[in-house]
Image (cartoon, rainbow, N blue to C red):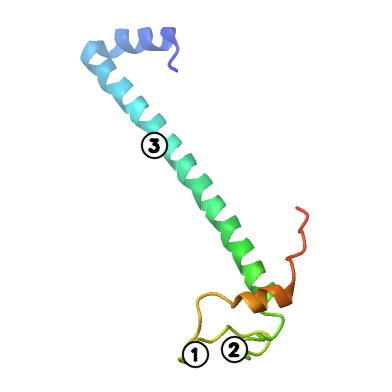
């Protein structure tokens, strides 16, 4: 919020039209800062999610897949021989639960 004394001094210095323009600029700056903060928070959340997804993928890939015989360290394969987007359920079960990670 803009202090009343600051607004009054702006009004005295530049007149009503100038004060309105200045207040518009200040409002735009505040909105921009809020938007940047929001997008920064969203980016950080996505990075945390990506890190968790990578850790889970590495954990599951540490064991060979009992369904498609993909070796440890590589992705599961579809019956067509192409790479699967997600690991087979049997491989997830064989890998066991992801150990809890304590924040540093």
Q: Residues within 10 Å of mark 3 (few under 14, many from 20)?
A: few
**Alpha carbons under labels 3 and 1: distance apart:** 51 Å
* Residue 75: percent from left, percent from top: 58, 83
User: What kind of element bears circle 2?
Assistant: loop
Which of the two residues, 24 or 36, is positioned nearer the viewer here?
36
Do the residues under discs 1 and 2 have CB atoms within 8 angstroms? Answer: yes
Q: Quadrant of the N terminus?
A: top left
Which of the two residues, 66 or 44, is positioned nearer the viewer here?
66
Q: Which mark is residue 32?
A: 3
Which image quarter: residue 11? Answer: top left
**In the rendered image, the vertical position of residue 94 relative to residue 80, given as above or below:** above
User: What kind of element bears circle 3?
Assistant: helix
- Residue at 71% from the left image edge and 80% from the top image edge: 62
Disc 2: which residue: 68
- Residue at 77% from the left image edge and 59% from the top image edge: 100
Q: Which mark is residue 98?
A: none
* Residue 30: percent from left, percent from top: 41, 30
Q: Residues within 10 Å of mark 1 (few under 14, many from 20)?
A: few
Would residue 93 appear left or right of 48 to someone viewing this image? right
Task: Mark 3 vs mark 1: give the one in front.
Answer: 1
User: What kind of element bears circle 1?
Assistant: loop
Q: Which mark is residue 79?
A: 1
**Alpha carbons under labels 3 and 2: distance apart:** 51 Å
- Residue at 41% from the left image edge and 12% from the top image edge: 6
Do the residues under discs 3 and 2 have CB atoms within 8 angstroms? Answer: no
Would residue 96 appear left or right of 4 to someone viewing this image? right
Which of the two residues, 43 or 23, is positioned nearer the viewer here?
43
**In the rendered image, the vertical position of residue 15 relative to residue 78, given as above or below:** above
**In the rendered image, the vertical position of residue 11 relative to residue 56, given as above or below:** above
Q: Residues within 10 Å of mark 2 (few under 14, many from 20)?
A: some
């Amino acid at each position: 919020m803009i202090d009343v004394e600051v607004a009054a001094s702006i009004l005295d210095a530049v007149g009503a039209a100038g004060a309105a323009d200045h207040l518009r600029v200040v409002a735009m700056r505040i909105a921009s800062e809020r938007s940047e903060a929001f997008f920064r928070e969203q980016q950080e959340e996505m990075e945390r999610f990506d890190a968790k997804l990578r850790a889970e993928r590495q954990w599951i890939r540490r064991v060979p897949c009992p369904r498609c015989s993909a070796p440890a360290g590589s992705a599961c394969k579809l019956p067509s021989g192409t790479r699967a987007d997600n690991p087979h359920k049997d491989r997830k079960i064989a890998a066991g639960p992801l150990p809890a990670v304590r924040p540093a």
